Image (spheres, helix red, strand yellow):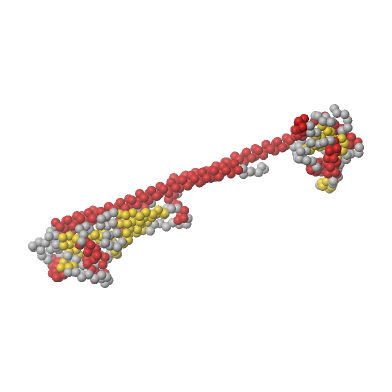
Amino acid sequence: MPRFRLRPTLLALLAAWLSAITLVVSMLVSAEISRWESHFDDDIRQMVSEVKHKLDTNEAVLAGFSAFLQAVDRSDTESTIKYAAAAIAAYPHIYMIEIARKVDKVEEVRLEQALRARFNANISFKDFSEVTGRPIQNEVRQGASWPILFLYPSLPSAQAILGVRLETVDYLSHTMALAARNVRPVASPAFQMYEGDKAFILLQEIRRPPTATESAMDIFGDTMMTLLLIKAQDLIPAKTQDYGKEMIGYSASLLSPGNPETILFEKMAQAAEGLEQFVLPRFTRQLKVDNTSQPMLITFDRQLLWRDLLQTQWLVIAIFLIGAIFVVPWMTIRHYASLDRAETEYERSAYLATHDLLTGLPNRFLFADRFEHALRGWQRNGQAFALMLADLDHFKNINDLHGHDVGDQVLTSCAKRMAGELRACDTVARHGGDEFVILLANILNAEDGENVGRKILAAISAPIETSAGPLTVSCSIGIAICPTHGATLDILRKNADRAMYCAKDLGRNAVSVFSGEKT
């Protein structure tokens, strides 16, 4: 079976093909990564836009509610409830609307009694520590207090907040001081609500001109603090569970002016597994949400996963690429293998056409070609050469006694021994049967031919190992010199044949040079 050869050309083609496939795959993967990165940027911009819209809405609602309170009757709680209900219905992310009134300390008892008698028998003014059971961290002493007198919706879980003095709430005392010096709303730091959720408060101080008819029953009074309670969870965009967005992690910090930065809401991105974290990129962005009173800084990150890349259309492309990776090299190797087989068959056919199948020596046709080369050398340069015929003595007896297999072993050994005694420029060929023809190039005289003949006789006379045991043979050699004994192949061969028979007549195992006249 012909042996396949990895040719340099084939290796170069396969290397170029694999390089091209690698380049295409890397370009496709890079394009897909860029596409996902673009989706990531679009998604976070959409999320930031939705958050900004809600923050802008907070300011608009608070401004509208503040304007309403400046115009409404000081005790018109019914209209105030309707306005608050409409605002919360329109903007569900607003959890609660509250109003706190500034009350002189000396007026607290009188106002509390009036409110119990007319509006709510259970209302009481209290510090926030009485609700939470935790002591006030920063005790504030003022000549006035700010009890919460209105909240909507009136949730059972929030009833404990009614009547709480705002200045006793740790995370609001500093914010209230900022609001008193600012015409714009001020946001508090993020905090944990009494009900348990995380939130922040947007508040604004409102002042109205005092009236001559002011009484204890003026619920809202001249100076108020309007508050919007915003649950952090409600600021998270509604479509964060869409495919792609649910993979995004985020961390939003509230950058309230004058207050410390606090984490408002956050979510961890899905973690990578195995090689994903080393091979696939992780997108990270930090965007600022511009808002006058509630600026935010949101950090987004998303780990690209294998499943993102292995979607239907890319699976089809991947299958084609994988097929191409194996099919094209397979077809190329198969093509080159067929070329190798054809070349091997050609070489074998050429060899069989010019060599003896048994001994591997040149046959008559190749010998004739070598003779023509030697003849042209003599014609150009005057270099003489000799033609020798060697015939094995009594070879027929070996075939008769031991069989043709043993005879073939003897012929093969004799052929190798003859070739071993010749130069690279000489040629020995099987002439037929047990007869061999030898071409000696570039000799000076007949004596050179005789010397080579005697070497061949000595080489052949050594015992030959065969399947029938060691056998000893001899041969008779006749020599004809060109141009002395002829200048054509036929004439030289005939004269060498005559010389060989002379050697046999001399008792065999001898070398004889043609001594007749030139034909």
**Which quadrant, please, contains the C terminus?**
top right
Q: Is residue 499 left or right of residue 59?
A: right
Name the residue nearer the viewer: 36 or 85.
36
Does residue 27 appear in this view? yes
Q: Is residue 9 left or right of residue 519?
A: left
**Which quadrant, please, contains the N terminus?**
top right
Residue at 35% in and 49% down: 42
Residue at 79% in and 43% down: 420
Q: Residue 417, located in which quarter of the rendered image?
A: top right
Q: Residue 353, located in which quarter of the rendered image?
A: top right
Name the residue nearer the viewer: 335 or 421.
421
**Image height of 447 relative to 157, above or below:** above
Q: Is residue 328 left or right of residue 107?
A: right
Please provide percent x and percent y for residue 15. 55, 45
Please provide percent x and percent y for residue 381. 77, 32
Q: Residue furthest right?
A: 506
Residue at 82% in and 32% down: 482
Residue at 69% in and 38% down: 348
Please provide percent x and percent y for residue 83. 18, 56
Name the residue nearer the viewer: 285 or 447.
447
Q: Residue furthest left?
A: 212
How many marks are shown on the rendered structure?
A: 0
Please provide percent x and percent y for residue 312. 44, 46
Does residue 315 appear in this view? no
Q: In this view, does 278 lie to the left or right of 49?
A: right
Q: Which residue lies furthest to the top in this view?
A: 519
**Image height of 341 relative to 110, above or below:** above
Name the residue nearer the viewer: 84 or 349.
349
